Amino acid sequence: MSEQAEKERIGDLLAAYAARAVPDDSDLWPAIATRLEIRQRRVGWAHLRRRVHVPRPLRRLVIMPIAAILLVGLLIATGFPWSRTEDGAVIELLNNLSAVAAAQPAESTDPIAGYYYMKTQGASLGISTFAGSQEQTFAVLVPSTREEWIAPDGSGRIIQTAEEPIFLGQRDRIRWQAAGSPNLARPLKVKLGPGEQQYDTYRHLPPDPKALAAAIREQAIKTNGPPVDVEMFVLMADLLRAPGVPPAVRAALFKVAGQIKGVELVGKVNDRAGRPGVAVARTTNNWGPRQRDTLIFDPTTSQLLSEERILLDRADYVDAEPPALIGYSLYLESKVVPTLPDDPSFDSLLPGQVVVRDQETISELRGRCSGKLSAD
């Protein structure tokens, strides 16, 4: 299917929502969000998994994840709440991580024989509005496990399993019950075709910190979204967790992090998996209430272990008493595997198709939208 046809299909799906054409038991948004996330990663910087911040809720029990690629891991840190430290301490920590990154063995420049495999556990905040009433809006933290297998040509697959939701306050639980207690744990399966994801792009990033900072800043300006320093922090974190980034580039990324305004030292912490690490954070109020994003690194390898997002102020979109964890990701495995796992359920899928439920693809869901949409 051409890119234009793909865009038109997604547009049709969104139009179906607007026309209330989707049956009550359908939830297309996870599939749409996943498809958009994949498409954003096709060219250059767009390969990076972008964080999607609190969106305006759609009608009809549409669970909207705050993170495309899932967010961050809970800190168990001394000195809570976090206190601002001298910039010199942050620079020292980042310089140490830079030196550790530079000392790591370089990956072969030859294409890998197999697939990059990545496993992530985390939770993202979903916001839903029932029947278009603001009074029926509720928010819920949805834990999940995500596995990705990506070949050198960008093909592969994604499997995401969801667990029981976590309500951060009684108000949201009561509203969810009033909406009929809909199922919020929706698994996803995605079959990727060639070119859907490409990691070799990262090998061509400049290892010079000044040149890399300029490239990241230029890309941050192009987004026309959050303030430049906020977006630079996002891009820096995206690159530090991406596979295939050369050690020299990773070392330069830590130098770049030290130039981003507002980055603070958290210190020694344990993530939600109990792994010891060192952490830095940045606080922003760009989306209203203050939120703190924290990155936790393994001090012995410089690898990004986990991320977390903490809500520091009361927000009307969630019934949570600050400081409240509203998202996290634990990066558990990253390695090269020779083959894809045996899973016959993928045999019938075409590249780009997304399974929202175990047996239903986005195309099949589209076909159930009240006859307003033509068949593919």
Image: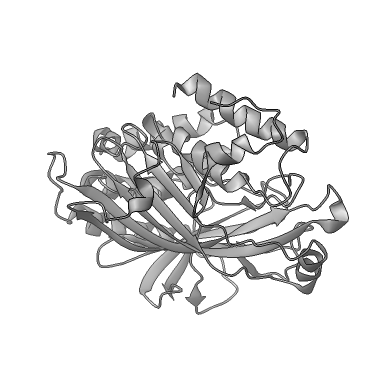
Question: Which is nearer the eye, 73 or 361?
Answer: 361
x%, y% of residue 142? 59, 63
Closer to us: 195 or 318: 195
Q: How does the figure colour the protein chain or chains?
A: one colour
Q: Position of residue 243 (x, y in %)?
A: 29, 48
Work out whether residue 237 or residue 146 is closer to the camera in this orientation and state it.
146
Q: Is residue 374 left or right of residue 37?
A: right
Would residue 86 be found to the left or right of residue 167 on screen?
Answer: left
Locate residue 309: give its quadrant.
Answer: bottom right
Q: Residue at x 62, y 24 (%)?
A: 374
Rendering coords of residue 209 (x, y %): 31, 40
Residue 245 horizontal side relative to residue 372, left or right: left
Q: Is residue 303 left or right of residue 138?
A: left
Number of numbered tags placed on the structure image:
0
Q: Quadrant of residue 156?
A: top left
Q: Position of residue 253 (x, y in %)?
A: 34, 46
The residue at the point 74 percent across, 72 percent down is 169
Q: Quadrant of the N terminus?
A: top left
Q: Is residue 366 above or below residue 143?
A: above
Q: Is residue 238 visible?
A: yes
Residue 226 visible here: no
In the foreground, 134 or 4: 4
- Taking the spot 55% from the left edge, 25% from the top edge, the residue there is 7
Q: Is residue 157 above or below residue 375?
A: below
